[in-house]
Structures are given as structure tokens and as C-alpha cells.
Image (spheres, rainbow, N blue to C red):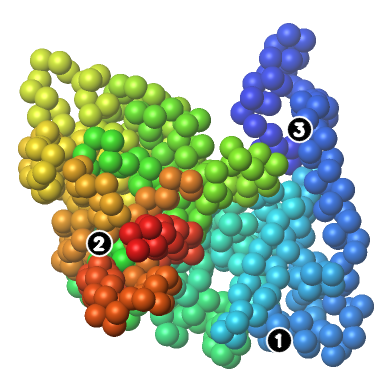
Amino acid sequence: MCKETLVEGSWEDLQDCIEVMLNEGQTSISPNVLLGFPESLEEQEEIEMEMKEVQRIWSSSVPFSDLLEEEVQLVKVMFQIGKLTNATLKKFGVRFFKPTKSLVFPWFSGRDSGLRGVKLLSAAVKDDGRVVYTEATVPKVSSYRNLFGLPLIGRKDGEVVLTGREVDSMAVSQATGLPSLALPRGVSSLPPILLPYLEQFKKVTLWLGGDMRSWEASKIFSRKLGLKRCSLIRPGEFQPCPSEALAQGRNLVRIIKASIPAAHKSIVSFKQLREDVYGELANVEQVAGIQWSRFLELNRILKGHRKGELTVFTGPTGSGKTTFISECALDLCMQGVNTLWGSFEINNVRLAKIMLTQFAMQRLEENLDQYDMWADKFEDLPLYFMTFHGQQNIKTVLETMQHAVYLYDISHVIIDNLQFMMGQENLSLDKFAVQDHIIGAFRKFATISCCHVTLIIHPRKEEDDKELQTASIFGTAKASQEADNVLILQEKKLVTCPGRRSLQVAKNRFDGDVGIFPLEFNKASLTFSAPVKGKQKIRKVMVDKNNSTEEIEEIELKETSEKPVKSAKVKTSKTVKGSAAGKGSTDGERKNQ
């Protein structure tokens, strides 16, 4: 971005402009040249369609000053912004879109401070009475580069408060009078393209929210912004998010003044760590990490997915390691975990096809008319792929991972698999020493970058009738020693009935819990899930009227004995796997009858 003209573009745009300058022998170039560079025809049409949609929403939305007082109060209650004044809403240009009952936050940017996009915040009441807020952006998320409140920033302002939500920014501005900006993607990402807008500030206070996830994001974003100029507001009972603090009548000026510097010395005392330790004790569930929605049994054992950890995952060849871990990662990605895939064994097209099938929960080959609909939704996920395939050098891979963490705020990296990275290393070294070096490098990366790394490693060759152990992981013991979590996909190769596969958590450094639970593979959707708890199928069995009472009792006993072990207390995700399996066994019993 050029600070003088406020013209912005990609690195390629800048190269093109410099090339034009050199060709024409000029020392400067008009900003209009960059604005005149045409996009491809498809991109141009897409941009025009999105801008028409932005203008349609904006012109159809109503300023709060045009609403009846009763309507204004209803909207404020709906979005929990009762303490925000009409003057503040007007100052930030917020409107109300009646057709979807949404708040409309405008994105003004560019040389003319023109309208570039909008964000719609909608509220919906769930069956259990909870109010859930959903966001939608036009243009789509990847093109939505917005710092809400930017037109209100003066050129001489040297201090700013960064928040994770638009309503929080308005609360800070109203209560303190300080310049305040909201990040477009909240705590999930701080795109580097926004950094030039924050260059002028000598002090940046990050108040991203009132939970542990916001606190972690604050520490990560402060590295990107420069630790020396950043201060952080630690979440706590008396320091919730700004909008809640305003609603509770707290002194926001005092809270901001009590912010702590982001830069820490190499050695700290317990006095400095005291609040962090209390935060972990007071927010046990949040500290445990992000929960899986498809693998509830994994939540019970591992407690959640946490940043800065190393997970080693192994299983027999052909057991479905890649398929399982892709669904596991997809589950987290759908909950906003920025994910980077490094697949050296399977090419990206095939991997994306597997993940899209798991995302749609159906065979898209048979439903090609639905492809675009599912692909559009899949495209919005914070999912990225490394372009490597085959054997790769560890240094190149780590540089790519580091770049992705900076650019996209990646918090989960999957490497599939370790053996493909060993071929490019020094051939004169012992292969076990090479593997130990690679594992050590990934361990260090996970810790320093505060990013979870999942490393798939093939096991040693074992006999088909033996279960894998932690010692079965290929190489020395370093892999299991360095890992925070060790997961093993067990497969009974000589068995073909349900219960053939199971997932074993062999190591869990977070709280020590280990265990094993069954998995069931659904070939149509390429998904795994724990089997549904068996029902008494006696009611469905067709019994001949001539059957004696004794025979019926035998059937009932047989049904009961075939039910899964009671320890697998798990409510599976809403897929057709369990019911399909149950139906299949019932049909088989009918034939036996």
C-alpha cells in the first residue's frame, strides 16, 4: 500500500508498475496506472457482481435514525448492544437490514473512502433457547480486507485499541474516546495486508475478547505487529470483552491503562506468571483446547486440540491413516482452526477430493449437480495445502510452514508423512539420526510458533495378528518421547466385521488420560465414527408363530451378547454410518431366521 496515494495491490501489481516505469524511462508513475490494470475477465465479472450485491444491501438497509424508537430498542436487545448510543452507531455508519434482521457494518476504504464491502451480523434462537450469532461478508471472506472504524482514524493518532468484533470497537470508542479498530476475522487471523494501516500507531492495545482463545490470539498477533509497541488486556472476571464491560458498567479507561506489555524478558518470576496460572485454573475447558464435533470420544480422552503441541499418528499400511486424519483436521477446520496440509504421499487434488467428500458427507460423483454448492462452502474454510509432492528437504518445508504461520495465522499443520522427508537429507548419516533431527525440528517449530503439528509416521513391520504399540513407531524412541500425544489407528487385518478398526490414544501429556475406542468406516462418505450403541433388535426380528418361547429367549440373549462394550459411551456425529450398519446386521439375522 502506498501511504501517500492509498493505492493498494498485490506484489505482482507493483512489479508490473516498476516494469512500466523502466520501459518508459520515468522516475514516477501515476496511481491511476495501477487502477487501470484490468483483471482477468472472470475476476472482473465476479468483482462487479459482488459490488452490485454490496450496493444492493447497503441501499436496502436503514440507518438507526430512520427506525422507530421501539424498533431500535428491540434490535439493541437482540444484539446485546443496549448501552451503545444511537450517536455511536451513526458515527460508525452501522445500519439495520430488515429482510434478514441483521446489523450491517460497512467497509470504507481506498483513495475515495468508498464503500468496498459489508459484514452482516444475524441473530438466531436455538431450540434450547441459546442465541447464536452468525456473520456473512460481501465480498467473500478471502477478499474482505476490512478494519472497521478506519475512516474515523486521524493521520496524527498514535494510539489504537484493536478488538475482535465491531460492537467491541464501538464500545471502546464510546467509553474512552480512543481510536478503535475491529479485525475482520476476529481472533482467527490478522492478514498481513492490513498491517500497513497500523503502521502509524506507536502504541497498539489488543483487547480481542474475554476468553482464553482471544488471549492466545493476542500474544500471536502482537509478534506480527511488533512486541515493543503492543500491550495486551488479559481476560478475567473483571476484564471481559469491551461490549460486556460497557454493559456491566465497568471503567474501560482503567482496564486499558492496566494492560500489560507484550514484550517479556527471557526470565520471569512467578509474580509475573501468577495471573496466567490463575487464568488456566479458572478456564479449564478453554485451556483444554478446541473440541471435535465428530469425534466426541476423542474429546473425552484428549480433552481437546491445543496449540503448541506435537501429535504423532501411526497405523498399519492401508488402514486409512490419511483418510482418518483428514477428517479429524477437517472437523477442527470447520470450527475456525486455520489448517495447513503437507501431503507428500497423496497429491493435493486427490486429498482435496477426499476432504470435500467428508465435508459433504456423500458421494459427489453421484450428485454432480450439488458440486458447486458444496465447493463454494468448502472454499470458505481456512484450509491451505503445501504444493510439495514426493521427497522434500526439511529446511524447505519448515520455511514454508513458518511463512504460512505469518501469512495465514496457521494453527494446525499436518505432515503426511515423515518417511517422505528423509530421502533428501544427508545420505551419509544414519537414517535414525536423520529422523530424530526432523522430529526435533518439528517439536521446536510447534513450541516457538505456538502451532499444533500432527506428524504421520509409518510403523515398523509387525505380524498381522499383533496390535501396534508405542514402540511400533518407526525409528528410535525420540518420536514418542518428543510427542505430546501419540495416536495409533489399530486394525485387525484378519477380521472383516464391524469393529475392525479402533483408535488408541497411547500418550496424552496434557492430563495423562489414555484409552481406546472403536471406529467404523463409511465408504460412501469416506468418514470414520464410533459405532452407534446397539439397540434391542429383538423387536425387528420376524418370529414365526410356531416358534417356542425358549427359541425367542435364545434370540434375545444372542442380541444382548452382540451389543458393544458398555465403556464406549459416545454420541456419534449425525451420519448414516451407525444406522446403516445396524440395518445390515438386522437383514442378516432375518436371513438366518
Instruction: Give the Cα separation between the discs numbered 2 and 1.
Output: 45 Å
- Residue located at (50% from left, 71% from top): 209
Instruction: Give the Cα separation between the discs numbered 1 and 3.
Output: 40 Å
Q: Which amino acid is tagged 1?
A: Val
Horizontal placement of 367 versus 329: left or right? right
- Residue located at (84% from left, 85% from top): 71
Identify the mark nearer the N-term, 2 or 1. 1
Horizontal placement of 44 versus 123: left or right? right
Residue beneath label 2, please?
Answer: 517
Which quarter of the picture shows residue 105? bottom right
Q: Which amino acid is tagged 2?
A: Phe
Q: Nearer the viewer, residue 376 or 563?
A: 563
Residue beneath label 1, please?
Answer: 77
Looking at the image, is 335 positioned above or below residue 69? above
Residue beneath label 3, please?
Answer: 43
Residue 92, x across and y down, in percent: 76, 68
Identify the element where label 1 is drawn. Answer: helix
* Quadrant the N terminus occupies: top right
